[in-house]
């Protein structure tokens, strides 16, 4: 297969993950879409366009063995990735009184540890080449620990600090690190019941978010974005 620019998207589902896959495919890149479960990939596989440039796989983003397998498969086919996106996460709203160690650990691993494992692996491949982009999906919880949201906030705040540290170390080596805070609900089947309760454009269009990721990827190194936020016009902040 002819070598082309390609992206690995971790955390593909029916919302933002699928939009990211479609956006980068539409711009001509090859895409490796990774989800925890095979069923999460059915949405993108239903679109037969450009499937010759799409590979799908399943992995646990908190497993170093799974991550090594994904990157080994990708590099053997296409070489070093041009861009890697970490879009995985986990959330469990609960009182600190009722929380369990198991739930807390699960959320922290999905929101933060996975970002470290994938960010480190991507950096090891990109630094020798002197170029590449690594993007992390954040949330409102990245900067604010709301009541009963600690399971999300602790991991997402850690992911933000990871991105900042990586950027300060790797930017001089030609690696662009970006962290995008999604402040609000993304329009998807998960939040379909909210559509009728919100004014027009009250939920974030996942395709519009994907456009932003693409813009960040294409930025010249004289004007790199590290942190940015995206929210619908009705969101209070």
Image (spheres, rainbow, N blue to C red):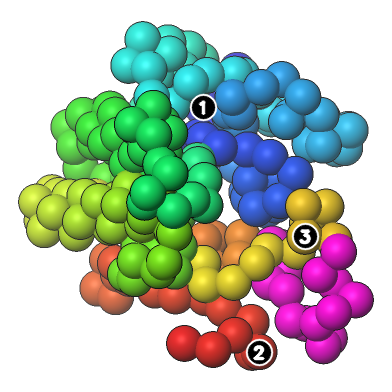
Q: N-terminal of the two: label 2 or label 1?
A: 1
**21 vs 146, nearest the viewer:** 146
Of badges 2 and 1, nearer the viewer stands 2
Name above or below for residue 63 compared with residue 180. Answer: above
Q: Position of residue 79 (x, y in %)?
A: 41, 22
Q: Position of residue 235 (x, y in %)?
A: 59, 85
Question: In the structure shown, which secondary structural element does the residue marked by tag 2 occupy?
Answer: loop
Say which residue label 3 marks.
191
Image check: 190 left or right of 8? Answer: right
- Give the CA separation, mark 3 to mark 1: 39 Å
Q: Main secondary structure of the magenta part?
A: loop
- Give the CA separation, mark 3 to mark 2: 16 Å
Question: In the structure shown, which secondary structural element does the residue marked by tag 3 occupy?
Answer: helix
Q: Position of residue 2 (x, y in %)?
A: 57, 23
Q: Residues within 10 Å of mark 3 (few under 14, many from 20)?
A: few
In magenta, the rendered stretch is: 193-208
Image check: 117 left or right of 58? Answer: left
Say which residue label 2 marks.
234
Say which residue label 1 marks.
3
Name above or below for residue 146 compared with residue 153. Answer: below
């Amino acid at each position: 297969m002819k070598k082309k620019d390609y992206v690995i998207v971790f955390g593909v589902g029916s919302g933002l993950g699928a939009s990211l896959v479609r956006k980068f495919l539409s711009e001509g890149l090859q895409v490796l879409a990774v989800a925890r479960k095979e069923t999460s990939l059915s949405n993108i596989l239903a679109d037969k366009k450009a499937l010759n440039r799409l590979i799908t796989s399943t992995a646990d983003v908190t497993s170093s063995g799974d991550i090594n397998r994904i990157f080994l498969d990708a590099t053997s086919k296409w070489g070093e990735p041009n861009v890697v996106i970490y879009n995985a996460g986990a959330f469990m709203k609960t009182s600190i009184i009722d929380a369990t160690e198991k739930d807390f650990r699960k959320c922290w691993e999905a929101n933060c540890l996975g970002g470290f494992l994938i960010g480190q692996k991507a950096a090891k491949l990109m630094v020798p080449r002197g170029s590449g982009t690594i993007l992390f999906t954040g949330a409102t919880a990245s900067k604010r620990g709301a009541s009963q949201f600690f399971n999300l906030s602790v991991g997402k705040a850690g992911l933000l600090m990871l991105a900042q540290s990586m950027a300060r170390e790797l930017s001089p080596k030609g690696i662009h690190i970006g962290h995008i805070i999604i402040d609000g609900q993304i329009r998807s089947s998960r939040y379909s019941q909210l559509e009728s309760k919100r004014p027009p454009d009250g939920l974030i269009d996942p395709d519009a978010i994907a456009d932003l990721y693409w813009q960040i990827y294409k930025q010249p190194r004289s004007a790199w974005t590290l942190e940015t936020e995206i929210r619908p016009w009705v969101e209070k902040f």
